[in-house]
Image (spheres, helix red, strand yellow):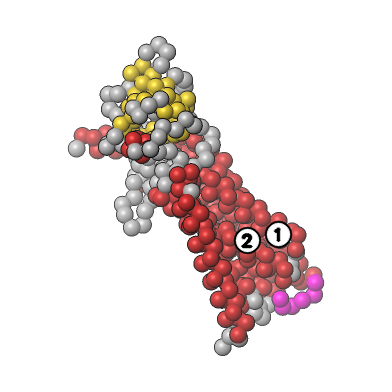
Amino acid sequence: MFKYFEPNRIFSITSKAPRYVLFLFILILSIGLTEALVFSPEDYKQSHAVRIMYVHVPAAWITLGIFSTITFLSVVGYIFKLRNFFLIAKSLAPSGFVFNIIALVTGSIWGKPTWGTWWAWDARITSMLILVLFYLMYLIAWRIYENNDKAFKITTIITIFGIINLPIIKYSVDWWNTLHQPASINILSKSTIHTSMLFPLMIMTAAFALFSLLIFLMKYNTELIKIKNKGLDRL
Amino acid sequence: MYGRKVKFRIIFVLLFIITLALTVFLVLKSLEENVVYFQSPTELKVLPELQKKKIRVGGMVKNDSIFVNSYELTFVITDFKNEINVIYSGAIPNLFEEGKGVVAEGYLKDRNFFSATKILAKHDENYMPPEVKEALEEK
């Protein structure tokens, strides 16, 4: 089904998409930033420092989401030998990596005024740092092995090692005593964040997701052009 | 539909994930006391012997327990079962308050006294505007 896809047909769609995605991204981001920085209320305890959360939390969500997607694509791609899946995974990784760093840096900036420290070796923060290292390994592996079968195998192994870390990141705040607070937004139980703060958070998440999509499309187009230049009409 | 190799690859990936997950689980389980960022006063009470090395203790700052004089600050950390007295001199974070979470880093003097070298405020998972907080308190 996916094995014999046609790069030319996909390219005709993905080469036009970035300009629309960019437009949407700028639109949603400006709404999100005005909501987050101007209209949303300050917090009863941390006052304006709460606004860092509107960047920190979406960045962390997106980076976890992208790593899960990369792992899924790599494993399925490895089992069924779908080269296109690897190219999608490869093109997704850079924005995941960038958002992971953003999450760590904004967390650090938030930590200084609230906790009183830039960095703490608690389970949540350390496991996020480990995820950055996995992203880095993943990206470097593609540089070393380029687009061949060896790269597919090695990057799949890296994602499987990395995915074990994801439940640790998610549940570290519940399993152990950590300096980092537990999740405020819960699907099963009641969320402990006020609606007026949840709204900008969601818009910012949408904006960041669009940014990831934009970077993904640009990377993916490059991969497709590379294939076209090699004169292959299928992978 | 799919060949033998595909089935083997599925089994290989599954075994790989299970083995890895189990290994990580066992390692974390045995290292539990190093993974936790701080211990509660109750956990300190049941320690077989007093530790000389630097530790962290965390919990709530007990209400009406903060006393400040010219050279030091004392307060009580409670987990609502046990308490520990903390002595500290130095800078405190903005969010350090009675009835709020705190983590103190330092040394145990004895079972009831802790000499802190650093104080961190722990933020909880509640986010709300000040008006909502006031409305909640009035209830």
Q: Are marks 2 and 1 in contact (CB under 8 Å)?
A: yes
Q: Position of residue B13 (x, y in %)?
A: 57, 71
User: Which residue is at 58% across, 50% downward?
Assistant: A130
Query: From what the image shows, is residue B75 above or below residue A35?
Result: above
**Range covered by the magenta-colored residues:** A230-235
User: According to the image, label 1 marks what residue?
Assistant: A141
The secondary structure that most of the magenta stretch takes on is loop
| Quadrant housing the C terminus of chain A | bottom right
Q: Position of residue A48 (x, y in %)?
A: 44, 33
Residue at the top extreme, as displayed: B70
A127 sits to left or right of A218: left
Residue placed most toward the observer, A132 or A51: A132
User: Which residue is at 48% across, 45% downward?
Assistant: B35
Residue placed most toward the observer, A19 or A120: A120
Identify the image quadrant of residue A47.
top left
Q: Residue A158 got which mark?
A: 2
B116 sits to left or right of A130: left
Query: From what the image shows, is residue B89 above or below residue A133?
Result: above
Any magenta on residue A234? Answer: yes
| Quadrant housing the N terminus of chain A | bottom right
Label 2 chain ID? A
